[in-house]
Image: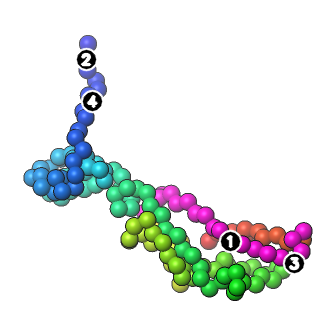
Amino acid sequence: MKNTSYKVQADVDSEEVRLQYQIEEGAYVTTSSGVWTVYNGEWVKLYPQAGQGTGLGWTRYDDDQYTSESKLTLADGVEVVLPNNGGDIYRSYDGIDYYNPTTNKVLGDNANDVYLFTVVFKASAANANQTFLRKEHIV
């Protein structure tokens, strides 16, 4: 019988321990932030590659121009870009920016990355039975 598969269980080291290792081409190290290897004399993170080592993160952009006291007025049949001036920004950690409030453009890190968006707002109308909002397109 021939073995065609091998299972290796690596210890999980801290980042401080990883940075003390001698650089050896092709070495693999697992830390709490991901899997690392040495390539061309430098540590390269293999997995996960997004964000600050977790692959997960979030940013929330709250508009502070339009509020309950200062409402955005919509007119029938007039297309409006949903404004968000990013007056209040909350991040899971510093350094992630996925929206430019000046240009109203969504920003991405890499081609083929996946992002989830949630848009939350309140609306009121004089006649709710004859009022509707329609998502025309996302640019």
Q: Earlier in the sequence, mark 3 or mark 4?
A: 4
Residue 23 seen in the figure: no
Q: Is residue 69 magenta?
A: no
Mark 4 nearby-residue class (10 Å; few <14, some 14–19, many ≥20): few
Q: Name the amino acid type tagged 3.
A: Ala
Foreground disc of the pair 3, 4: 3
Q: CA distance from mark 3 to mark 4?
A: 66 Å
Q: Name the amino acid type tagged 4.
A: Lys
Query: Which mark, residue 2?
Result: 2
Q: CA distance from mark 3 to mark 1?
A: 17 Å
User: What colouring does the structure picture have?
Assistant: rainbow
Q: Residue furthest front?
A: 69
Query: Which mark, residue 121?
Result: 1
Residue hosting label 4: 7
Q: CA distance from mark 4 to mark 2?
A: 15 Å
Q: Earlier in the sequence, mark 3 or mark 1?
A: 1
* Coordinates of residue 88 in the picture (x, y in percent): 52, 79
Mark 3, secondary structure of its residue: loop
Q: Which residues are magenta?
A: 110-129
Relative to 133, residue 54 above or below: above
Foreground disc of the pair 4, 2: 4
Q: Residue at x 23, y 38 (%)?
A: 10
Q: Main secondary structure of the magenta part?
A: loop
Q: Quadrant of the C terminus?
A: bottom right
Residue hosting label 3: 126
Mark 3 nearby-residue class (10 Å; few <14, some 14–19, many ≥20): few
Relative to 131, residue 113 above or below: above
Q: Name the amino acid type tagged 2.
A: Lys
Q: Is residue 128 magenta?
A: yes
Foreground disc of the pair 3, 2: 3
Mark 4, secondary structure of its residue: loop
